[in-house]
Structure formats: structure tokens, C-alpha cells
Image (spheres, grey):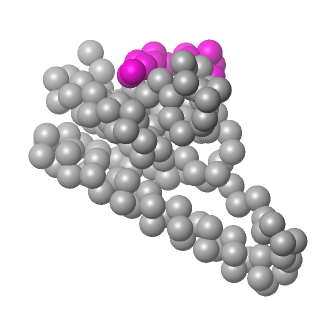
Amino acid sequence: MFNNILVPTDGSKLSQKAVQAAMQLAMVNGASLVALHVYPKFSGSPYGTFGPAKDVIAEAHIRHHESEAEKLFAATKKLASAAGVELDCALVESDDVYRQIIAVARKKKCDLICMASHGRRGLSAVVLGSETHKVLTHSSIPVLVIR
């Protein structure tokens, strides 16, 4: 039924639940899995840093998120290995999370997006996360929402 499943994750408990659900679907369908983490773009120093100092801070921002993503993906890699599921991990820097989710799903030729109903976006996302809602609204790829 499904050949390639995209699962965006932010490390929250609910997104980890979505990872587990996607992993089970992949096992049942003999599908591969694409784990995606989107982190925010560097918005600059709060102190108005410029020049070389800004470059150093921007590089530290990237290294921090790459390190966090590696930890995040390590658990998913372990699950995939134990389940015999082929896994591809993608890390993207962007402030347009939903657009990146859809873009990566298209680029990786995913036929299902499996994602949490909400993540770490505060009270406005309690019922249905704003990113999830945007993906549901704009994606032509089927979306499975995990609560």
C-alpha cells in the first residue's frame, strides 16, 4: 500500500509516537521511512552582532541543531535497524516548516506523511498543531495524523 513514508519529528513525546506509528506502518507494508527534522533559521544575535562574530554565532547555531538532530535520529535509526526498515534521515534549516515537510515528501517520493497532531508550538497548537494543519491543507500527499 505504501512504499515510502515521511515522518517529521521535533523530539516531542507525541512526535516520537508518530515515529513509532510510521515505523509499524513501514514494517507492515515493507516500506522505507524518511525521518525529517526542520530547525529554525538563525535570526541573528540579540545584541546586534555583525561581521565575523555573527558568522561564528551562526555556525554555532547550525552545529547545535545538527548535534541535536543526530541525537534525535539515533533513536529512530536504532528502531529502524531492529525492525528491518530502511531509513533515510533529512535535516533542513527553515522557518517554513510545513513547506519543507511537503517539499521533502515530494523530493523523496513519499506516498504518506505520518505526523503528530501537534508539537512544541505552545497553546495555539493544543488541538491541532498549526504546522500539521498547514500540511493537511496544502499537501496532495495523504497525511496520517497521530494523537
The percent coordinates of residue 103 (x first, y second) are 58, 35
**Residue 30 in sight here:** no
Q: Quadrant of the C terminus?
A: top left
The percent coordinates of residue 113 (x first, y second) are 43, 26
Q: Is residue 36 above or below residue 5?
A: below
User: From the viewer's perspective, is 74 left or right of 105?
Assistant: left
**Residue 98 in sight here:** yes
The percent coordinates of residue 8 (x first, y second) are 45, 37
Quadrant in which residue 21 is drawn: top left
- The residue lying at 84 percent from left, 72 percent from top is 47
User: From the viewer's perspective, is 87 left or right of 11?
Assistant: left
Is 41 included in the stretch rendered in magenta? no
- The residue lying at 62 percent from left, 67 percent from top is 61
- The residue lying at 74 percent from left, 77 percent from top is 55
Q: Nearer the viewer, residue 111 or 78?
A: 78
Q: Is residue 134 above or below residue 78?
A: above
Q: What range is drawn magenta here?
A: 134-147
- The residue lying at 55 percent from left, 20 percent from top is 128
Residue most toward the front? 123
The percent coordinates of residue 78 (x first, y second) are 20, 52
Q: Nearer the viewer, residue 38 or 68?
A: 68
Q: Nearer the viewer, residue 53 or 147?
A: 147
Q: Quadrant of the N terminus?
A: top left
Residue most toward the bottom? 52
Is 135 included in the stretch rendered in magenta? yes
Q: Is residue 34 above or below residue 47?
A: above
